[in-house]
Amino acid sequence: MKYSTRDLVTLAVFGALWGFSEISLGTVIKSLNIPLSGVVLSTIGLIIALTGRIFVPQKGSTLFIGSLAMLLKLFSLGGVVMGPMIGIFSEAIVAETVLSLLGKPRKLTMLLAGGLGVLWVLIQPFVTGPILFGRTVFDVWINMLIMGGRILGISDTGGLWIVSFLIIIHLCIGVFAGWLGWKLGNILKSRLGISSTLGAAV
C-alpha cells in the first residue's frame, strides 16, 4: 500500500504518541503495581492507533503505527523490555488483521478490533511466558487465576468464574477503546476540516 507524504507524517505522529505513552505511563503504572496495568496501556495504545486509522484508512496503517510505537519502546528506562514490545506489536497485528479483513473502517469493525486487541493482553503470557521466560503454561494459568481472584475478592479455585470475568472485562474495555478511537478520529477530522465518509458508517 502506497502512502502519501501527509499520510506518513500522520502515521508517525500517532505512532510517536503510542510509543511515548508506553515510555512515560508504562514506567509509572508498572511501578505502582496497578491491577490490569497491561490492559490500561493496551487501551491507551489502541485508542491512539484506531484514531490514526480514521485519519489514514488504508491497509497497513495500524500496523505501521504499532511498529513505530514498538521501536520507541526501546528507549524505555531500564533497557529493552521484550514483553511490552511484543505486546505492542501483537496488539497492532490483531487490530490490523480485523480492520484489513473487514474492509473500510466502520464502527463495528473498530469495536471488534479494539476488543480483540485488548483481549490479546490476557492471551500473550501463554505465548511469551514459555518462550521468553521459561515459565510453563500451568504457571501462567495459576498466576492468571490468582490475579483474577484478587480482583474479584474470591478464591482462585473458582477458575471458570475468574476466567469468564477476565475475558468479559478485557473485551468490554477493548470495545470501549474501539468506540473512543472511532469517535475521536471523526471528531478530530471534523474539527480539522478534513473530509471523511466514515462518520455515518456503521
Image: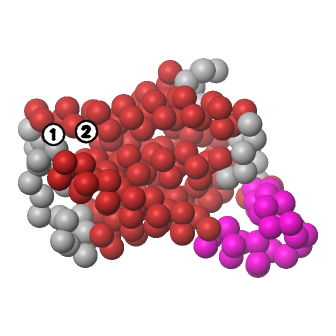
Residue 174, x across and y down, in percent: 49, 62
Graded by Cα atoms within 10 Å as few (under 14), some (14 to 19) or many (20 or more), the crowding at tag 1 reads some
Residue 53, x across and y down, in percent: 26, 52
Element class at badge 1: helix
Residue under the point 65% across and 56% down? 126
Residue under the point 59% across and 31% down? 81
Residue under the point 72% across and 45% down? 34
Residue 123 image-quadrant placement: bottom right
Q: Is residue 71 visible?
A: yes
Residue type pointed to by label 2: Leu
Element class at badge 2: helix
Asked if marks 1 and 2 touch (Cβ < 8 Å), the reply is yes
Residue type pointed to by label 1: Asp
- Judge whether 149 appears above or below 192 on screen: below
Q: Distance of mark 1 from mark 2, alpha carbons?
A: 6 Å
Q: Nearer the viewer, residue 202 or 120?
A: 202
Q: Is residue 138 visible?
A: no
Using residue 171 as the reference point, say whether residue 31 is left or right of it.
Answer: right
* Numbered mark located on residue 7 in the image: 1
Residue 149 in the magenta stretch? The answer is yes
Give the residues drawn in magenta, as a range: 140-168
* Numbered mark located on residue 136 in the image: none
* Numbered mark located on residue 11 in the image: 2
